[in-house]
Structure formats: structure tokens, C-alpha cells
Image: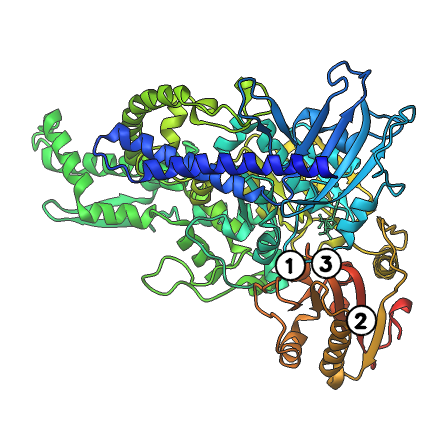
Amino acid sequence: MQNEQQFVSLLHERLDALREQAEAAVESVTGQVTTVRQARVERDISVAEQSGLVARLNAVESGLCFGRLDFADRATDGTESGATRHIGRIGMRRDDAERTPLLIDWRAPVARPFYLATGHTPMGLRRRRHITTQGREVTALHDEIMDLDDTTRTGFENPDADAVLLSALNSARTGRMSDIVQTIQAEQDRIIRAPHQGVLVVEGGPGTGKTAVALHRAAYLLYAHREQLARRAVLIVGPNPAFLGYIGEVLPSLGESGVLLATVGELFPGVVATGTDTPEATEVKGRAEMARVLAEEVRDRQTLPDPVLEIRHEDYGALTLDRETAREARQRARDTGLPHNLARPVFAFRVIDALTEQLTDRIGADPLGGPNLLDPSDIAQLGKEIATSPEVQAAVDALWPTLTPRRLVADFLADPDRLAPRDAAAVRRAGPRTGTDGIDDWTPADVPLLDEAAELLGEDDSAARAEAARERQERIDYARGVLELSYGSRTQEFEDKDDEDSEVLAAHDIIDADRFADRHEEADTRTAAERAAADRTWAFGHIVVDEAQELSAMAWRLLMRRCPSRSMTLVGDPAQTGDAAGCDSWDQILRPYVQDRWELTRLGVNYRTPAEIMEVAAEVRRTADPLFEPPVSVRSTGAGPVVRSALPAELARRTRETVASLVAGHPAEGRLAVIAPTPLLPALAAALPDASWAAIPDLTRPVVLLDARRAKGLEFDTVVVVDPEAIMDGSPRGTNDLYVALTRATQRLAVVRDAQVPSRLKSLMP
Ligand SMILES: Nc1ncnc2c1ncn2[C@@H]1O[C@H](COP(=O)(O)OP(=O)(O)OP(=O)(O)O)[C@@H](O)[C@H]1O
């Protein structure tokens, strides 16, 4: 233990030294004042790099080193004979001439036996050690002998190989998910390190570690393919903001920050989707056919005169645009296949041509019947006058208006006549107020519609692009110089890959002058993730979707547009689908985009819910699917759910008593959630004044009140489910919602039933 303590102390000293260096570097450049543009670029880059490094070093402080591998003297693969390697959150080297490896990043290939080796397949190991620390102090060691012929003993051998895992699973929850880097299981490790191309679907029941695996996979991919992914950023999509808050600390604790966490409702820059839809409206808006409906809405705006449009020209009097000419112009514009706003100039040119011809005929007609008296330069001049005439422009606008996505979708929702009457009634809402460009409270289900509209409409940005190209060339010239400088001052002490592959990246490692110029233009020192968040057309390097079963067909269209490489990890559980627009089958989701070229893998062990609680939850699922088999719980606590019942008027009071007795029975422990049907929440909030209750509840509070939909993906030490039958009947997928609610507890479950409702579930009888 003492030796291990010394080593861990040494690691922290090294970490301190690296941090001091980085902080000093930030300080030394921050104060520099310069007017030379190249020097300013260098300074900004330096500050961004070194500040990022400081943040990263701070984040890995806790649990910096958690494992040790002792390789056998006679190594089977010939690489690590007799060596000892410590495994940690990041890689570090000594500050010596050889830059000796000190700590191996958990993602490095050499760390892999830590997760995969078994007595049967020792992968060259003699011993594997789990090191538990608190702050900088080593508090426990657990050794596993991998080579049975090896008779050396350390005194820390633990017959219970799962002791470290079980201690992690039993620890009190904090309202924030923690990483599992110390105890990743072999089946999880294989998914985390699966190849990065293509679509990988990870399916598994509640608590099987899908979220944990998805996040560690993102961290692994950023390590293994940093060059590609740091530049394009990784997007992690979660079901709601509370869930994103819950998982938000995992990647920083693994030293990663180049990731954008977002809900689908946050993926249309400039729109904050604060509204809510009924389940019916969500379902209708999520249907794939909405793409066609919106396309038809756009075509509807490309109108024709009926039968002619009279245009009064200031100087030349009345001009007429007939239906046939407009139809021909419209066809030409449509034939380009361009989005509406980009095809508009084609339509406009044709109309202007026709009007110019009309005017030419009128003004230049030879009274004697000879050829037109105007010469080509006169005609060109007339054309210009027509094109710039406000009346002509108004006529073009009336027939082919420039449209914005917000306006189009708002108008459609105000008047959704194209839909069947029931569907129209479900989605109809007040139109945009005069003068506004949309509606005030967009809902998450509107966002894929807005994105679809943006695709259909396009943005005429040719002038802006030409200007951007010119500026970019200027930046490239400066960036070339900066890169040369950056290579000269590269970091030396912080790697466990070879030199060219350093995991601490400096500018010269990952980019050439072109890309560098893109990233560090003077006016924009944002990270790739930040820039991605502001850019609707950003193509992410990899997308991870959690609770993927909840996404609608329209949301998938949006996500696929953001990921042209189709490098994606989708995790989910169709048995937990709650959203009315959610999909039931992966094939149905993926076929339109990748046909059958996607891979499915399953996780079968439940690390969260004890066996006794899982049995009750499984019974709920079996009411919908009699052959349902739940994932196997890794733990059992010996305690089944406590069931109480009360008359409807007493439900809130009974719930308060139940919460009070559970809190009193387990005073210092973790978090408690009350999960109830949405209509009951106000009454329960009044009865539980200390509970956190909001659209985005504070999960770090001791008691949290929420409905089943918001509980998705979360977990608590203790869960009280109120009125289970009402949750079941509350929506078309209510059985799934109740299944979700019952599977959120890591330790204890209580159920408060409505005594007047006959129970459909044997195990939920008092
Ligand atoms: N290898 C592991 N070591 C330690 N804890 C683990 C491990 N795998 C999973 N867990 C823990 O199990 C719990 C459930 O994991 P997670 O939330 O990822 O499951 P999930 O499959 O996403 O569940 P759900 O479908 O219900 O949202 C978490 O507390 C997670 O930290």
C-alpha cells in the first residue's frame, strides 16, 4: 500500500507541475498587448490551448490513477515482458530525457487487458490491481491473480472479483452520473472500442450501462481518432435538458470537452423550444410524411397569376404577366432542383425577360411594320429598368416569395389544411403575429420541421460566401507562419503514444494551415463544438444518440443531415419508448439511410436495479408482451418494493408519509425521486414542499418530483412511484412509462396506489 501511495503521490506531483506550467503559459501571454495581427493570432491560440489543458488537468484530479497491470515475465505477445503499468484517466510521462511513461491512458491499447483479461485469457498479465483513492490518498487495493502458476502474493488478493464493481454500484447517488472507467465490463469494453465507421446500435434493458457505454465510447473515439473528430466535433443527443445535466460531468472527468450535448429541440440555431405539444401533436409532427407535406407547402407558395397579373411601371405604364408565361418561368426554376430561395432568381430572370420583351415590342415597334427599332443596348437598358423596378419586384415576390423556415412552418401550423382533419386539429395553433417571423414558443417537435423547411428553402448566401473565401485566404497565409512556430514549441512530457501520435495535441498535430485558418480566424476563437452549435449545416464527425428509441422519423432526418459520414452510435431500448412519435424498430429507423448496413449489439446485465425490483418491473412489461425477459440484475438487496394504498384524496398525504419514512430510515443516503402521473404533480408538490419540481428539476436535491417521461435515463437510490395504474393509462405507451418509472431505483422502491382502482399487477398489491 505504501509503495502504491508513493507512486500515486508522484503522479499528483507531476500533474501539479504540468498544471503550473500551463497556468504560467496562460498568464504570460494573456497580458501581451500587440497590434500585429499574426502575433494576436498566436496569442489567442496559445491561451485557448493552455486554458484547455488546465481545465483538462483539473478534471482528471479525482481518481487520476485507478489500476495497475503486472505483466508476466514470459509475455505471451512479447511486448510487455515483466513490466508494470499504471492505468489512469490520462497518459503522463516523466520529466526525464527519455520521457518515460508514467501513467497509461485507459484508452491506450496497452491498457486493454485491464478490462478484458480473465484467468482463462490472461492477455499476458500476471496480476491486475484496482487502486481506490480518495483525493490523493490510496484507500484500498484489490488484486486479481491472472497467472495461476505464479505463487507470489501481495496480501491484497480479493476472492470477490466483483468487489470494486459492487462497491461502485452500491454507492449513494449524487444526482450526477459518474464515469465507470475503473470498472468497465468486458462486454461494455468491446462496444466502447468498436470501429468508428458506420452505425452501431446498442440495445439493452434498463440499467445495462447503455448511457455509460455511449459516453465512454465518445471519449474513446476522440482519443483514437482525434485528428478527425476534434475538428468536426462529436454530438451527443439526449432526451431532455435534465438528462443532459445528469450526464454532463462524465466526459470532463475523462478529460474530454470537445463534445456538444444537445436535445433535438436545441439543434436549430436561434430557436429555443420551450413549448409543449400534446402526444397527438408530437406524433403527427414526427411522421416521415411531414417532409412531403412541407415540400408541398413550399410548392404552394410558387403561385401563378389568375389569369394575368397587371404590373404598373412608373415610366412605361401597364405591363401584363400572363399565366402561361409565369408557368413556364416557374417550371424552369423548379427544373433546376435548387431549394426554393435559391431557385427564385431563375424565376425572376425569366419573368424580367418576358416583361422586357413586352416593353421592347411596345416601344420599339416600327409603325411601318419593319423590324424593331431598338438596338441591343437599348433593350439591355430596358431590362435593367424592369429588373430594378419596385413594382416588378413586388410582382415576383407575390408569385415566388423569399421564405424563411420560421415563417413557413408557422404559417403551416396556423393552417394545416393539407393534413387529415383529425391530424390538422391536433397540430393547429395560432398563426404568427403580424410582423413576427414565427411563433413565440416553438416545441421540440417543431424543430425537425424547421430544419426540414430550411433544407427546402435554402439560403441565398452567395455574396457572403465570396467574401468569406477572400478572408479565408488571408487567414491561411498567416496561419502557415503560426503552425511553424507551434511545432517548434511542442509539448514533450505528456504522452503514452509515440511522438507523432501524442495524445496532448498542439495545433501542429492535428491541422494543416487550411484547417487551422478555419479554426482560428481572428473573429472566431470558439471550439469546434461551440461553432457546431451555432451552425445548422455542421457535419459532425460522430453522433451518439441516447434513448434513441424516442426520436421521431423527422428527428432522424435532421440527425442524418448532420452526419453525412453516418458514423453513429445509437443506444436505446424499444421497451422503454414513451414518446408518441418514437420508433419501435431499428430497421424502420435506419433502412432509409443505410439500408441494412448497421450493426446491432446487446447488453444483457442490469447494473442498476436490484433483482427484486426488476421482477416487479418485468411483470408490468409482460402485460404488453407476455414473453418479455428483463436483463439480469447483477445485484440483489433482499428487499422487494413496499406497497401502500390510499383513497384518491389521500394520495398526496400518503406519499408524503412514505417519503418521510424512507428518508428517516436511510438518513444520509443519496437521492430520492417521487415519480407520478403528470396531472398529480401539482398536488404532490404542495405536499412535498422541499422537493425539486420544475420543467428541468435540480437532480442534486435530496428529493426530486417528476413524471415518468422526465425520469427517463435517470436513477436514484430510492424511488416512490405514485398511482402506477394512472401512469399506465396516461398515454398510449403508458406501460412503457411505468416500466421506466419502476426501474429507476438503485436500492429501494415504494409504490403508493390508488385504493379504488383494481390492481392489474399482482406484485403491486399492498
Ligand atoms: N461497468 C460498470 N461499472 C460501474 N457502474 C456501472 C457499470 N455499468 C453500468 N454502471 C452503472 O449502472 C447504472 C446504469 O447505467 P446507465 O444509466 O448507463 O444504464 P442505461 O442502460 O442507460 O439505463 P436506462 O436504459 O434505464 O437509461 C449507472 O449508475 C452506471 O454508472
Indicate which disc, 2 or 1, sits on the residue closer to the N terminus.
Answer: 1
Give the CA distance from mark 2 to mark 1: 21 Å
Badge 1 crowding class, 10 Å Cα cut-off, few under 14, some 14 to 19, many 20 or more, is many
User: For residue 697, which quarter of the picture?
Assistant: bottom right
Tag 2 residue: 751
Q: Secondary structure at mark 3?
A: loop
Q: Secondary structure at mark 2?
A: strand
Ligand 1 within 8 Å, label 1 CB: no
Give the CA distance from mark 1 to mark 3: 10 Å
Q: Amino acid at mark 1?
A: Gly
Residue 172, disc: 3
Residue 472 image point, x, y percent: 31, 28
Tag 1 residue: 175
Against 583, is 500 above or below?
above
Residue 98 image point, x, y percent: 56, 17
Q: Say which quadrant the C terminus sits in.
A: bottom right
Instruction: List the single residue furthest toward the top.
Output: 78
